[in-house]
Image (tube, rainbow, N blue to C red):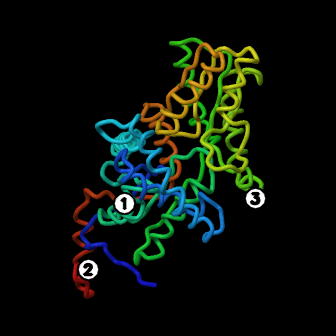
Amino acid sequence: MKFISNIEFTHSQADKIGVLITNLGTPTAPTKQALKPYLKEFLSDPRVVEVPRVLWWLILNGVILNIRPKRSAHAYSTVWSEQGSPLLVHTKNQAMALDKRCKEAWGDDVIVEFAMRYGQPSVASTIERMQQRGVRKLLVLPLYPQYCASTTGSTFDAVSQYFQTARWLPDFRFISHYHDHAPFIVAVASKIKRHWDTHGRADKLIFSYHGIPKRYLLKGDPYHCECHKTSRLLAEELGLEKDQYLTTFQSRFGREEWLKPYTDHTLKALPEKGVKSVQIVCPGFSADCLETIEEIGIENRDYFLQAGGERYEYIEAMNSDDEHIDMLFGLVKQNLAHWHVASGTDNMQYTQRQALAKSLGAEN
């Protein structure tokens, strides 16, 4: 194995703590040409699609990548803004807001960056850049409240792949989930309450989570259980009875069975049962993206109204709301416990360190 050493280290550089938040990813543009490499990277991940590699390579390259990029490009074009994709914009804003909170607490000793598991900025390039800036201790926080091998596990894979070729590894911590973290539950519930204060309540509150194939659950993935626990804790925080809310799963792909009940099937069936108004929130999404804005906000809305529903409201993700950033900062602070970096403003200690290193033969 070839080890890389791209860190331009000098003994006079101040040591830093790094906080890396990550999300799924996005194409660089809402075009067929941009979607194809993005989808290829995403769907080639064995964590995402657990199918024998040779068979899947033939299906992916022979069928899917010749059909899906055009369809996905159209969907992305409906949510794209001048700043780019919603997920990129929101994740960047979250990183900036979290960085501000960390600077207020620790000055320049803590650096906050963001990366995407698929697409840009990549996990590897971002960690390398952070190390260039002096990060010697690294905390990685994937913005997936509920653990799933396809998301959180895949993010760990990306980090470890970089580490496998890096010559200098930082001290490392990884937050795998926070689905039942009390401040997270309170923050989501507060968002829902604020919506109620403005719009009133509906017949049903629906918690919709991204789906995964059912066989992943049967093989031991805890995602399904963690989603239901989040729903139960939110219902308790909101004072809801069992008949006042539902937990469903969206975003299926392929023909096999996924986690049920399906969000779209549920919405099509509810009006016949007398449910004429619904409000939907997606507690598994830390930022609004194609799956919430287009799929939940538009596509599923049409299903419900066409089936006889009368009122449909999507409650936005927490994005960079103050309560969300406060929760993330608290999570970071908790996980940075006992990590200490001497203040970078104490230049004398690093000057002395460099002088001592040079006396022992170091170049920088």
- Read off the residue under disc 3: 219
Asked if marks 1 and 2 touch (Cβ < 8 Å), the reply is no
> The residue tagged with tag 3: helix, strand or loop?
loop
| Amino acid found under the numbered disc labelled 2 | Leu
- Residue at image mark 2: 356
Q: Upstream in the sequence, badge 3 or badge 1?
A: 1
Please tell me which of labels 1 and 2 falls first in the chain: 1
User: The residue under label 1 is which amino acid type?
Assistant: Thr
Res 126 label: 1
Residue 166 sits above or below residue 225 on the image: below
Task: Please tell me which residue lies in front, 112 or 260.
Answer: 260
- Tally the numbered discs: 3
Q: Residue at x 26, y 73 (%)?
A: 8
Q: Is residue 345 left or right of residue 21?
A: left
Q: Secondary structure at mark 2?
A: helix
Measure how far apart labels 3 and 1 are at the Cα level.
33 Å
In the drawing, what numbered circle is on residue 338?
none
Residue 24, image x, y percentages: 48, 50
Label located before the other in sequence (3 or 2): 3
